[in-house]
Amino acid sequence: MNFTEIALNRQSCRSYDEHRPVEEDKLQAVLEAVRLAPSACNGQPYHITVCRGQAAKDAAAACMGMGMNKFASQAPVVLVLSEEAYVPTAALGSKVKKNDYRSIDIGIAAAYLTAEAAALGLATCILGWLDDGKLRQLCGLTQPVRLVITLGYAKEGDPLRAKKRKDLTELVSYLEATP
Ligand SMILES: Cc1cc2nc3c(=O)[nH]c(=O)nc-3n(C[C@H](O)[C@H](O)[C@H](O)COP(=O)(O)O)c2cc1C
């Protein structure tokens, strides 16, 4: 698949085959994609906790507040993306430029992870509705959890949806000379 094909095939999966585990080599390939992702000052200020078995169920439960994300409990793997310390240059840049590079870096890592998963035929859903406190306790983390990603195989028959996105004219403007 080329990149456009991957982008069209990646979708938020909310229906997993609970009986189909993720092969170890595919899990490692997905994690390797994160390792290759770019980040501010190449600092890679994040950590991924791979939750499987009962830990996956517990991590999923921490994303189900107010009845949300019930499907997460079907996923055989739940990846918890938490912050790590900035490298000094990125910390300085973030402070001077008042820009949250860490969240940006975690977003890019999630994009790489989910794209590689799609390329391998795996299904993912990025979850931002999460209970930071519960996840930190479960995973033994001291830094904030920013995203959770469910990983598995989609249930047979789960349809590929057409992408509903804003028109490019809403997203992009072109500037060729300063006014
Ligand atoms: C930062 C972020 C947080 C998200 N949180 C949730 C979530 O908690 N639950 C959920 O079902 N989907 C969540 N999504 C998935 C989006 O709803 C989804 O990406 C968007 O509707 C586009 O659909 P698609 O991923 O199928 O192309 C999240 C996506 C992102 C990028």
Image (cartoon, helix red, strand yellow):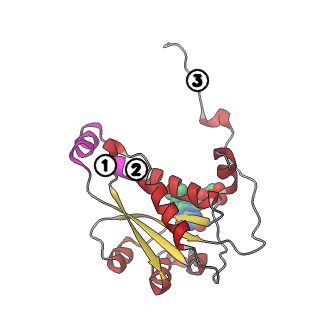
Query: Which is more N-terminal, label 1 or label 3?
Result: 1
Task: Find the magenta span and give its range.
Answer: 86-103
Residues packed near mark 2 inside 10 Å, few (<14), some (14 to 19) or many (20 plus): many
Query: Where in the figure is residue 59, as x and y percent of width and height?
Result: 45, 78
Give SS at disc 1. loop
Say which of 98 and 159 sits in front: 159
* Residue behind mark 1: 43
**In the image, 168: left or right of 58?**
right
Distance Cα–Cα, label 3 vs label 2 = 26 Å
Say which of 171 and 53 sits in front: 53
Q: Residue at x 65, y 75 (%)?
A: 16
Give SS at disc 3. loop
Q: Amino acid at mark 2?
A: Asp
Q: Amino acid at mark 1?
A: Gly
Vertical placement of 129 versus 105: above or below?
below
Question: Does residue 3 appear in this view?
Answer: yes
Magenta residues: mostly which secondary structure? helix
Vertical placement of 5 versus 170: above or below?
below
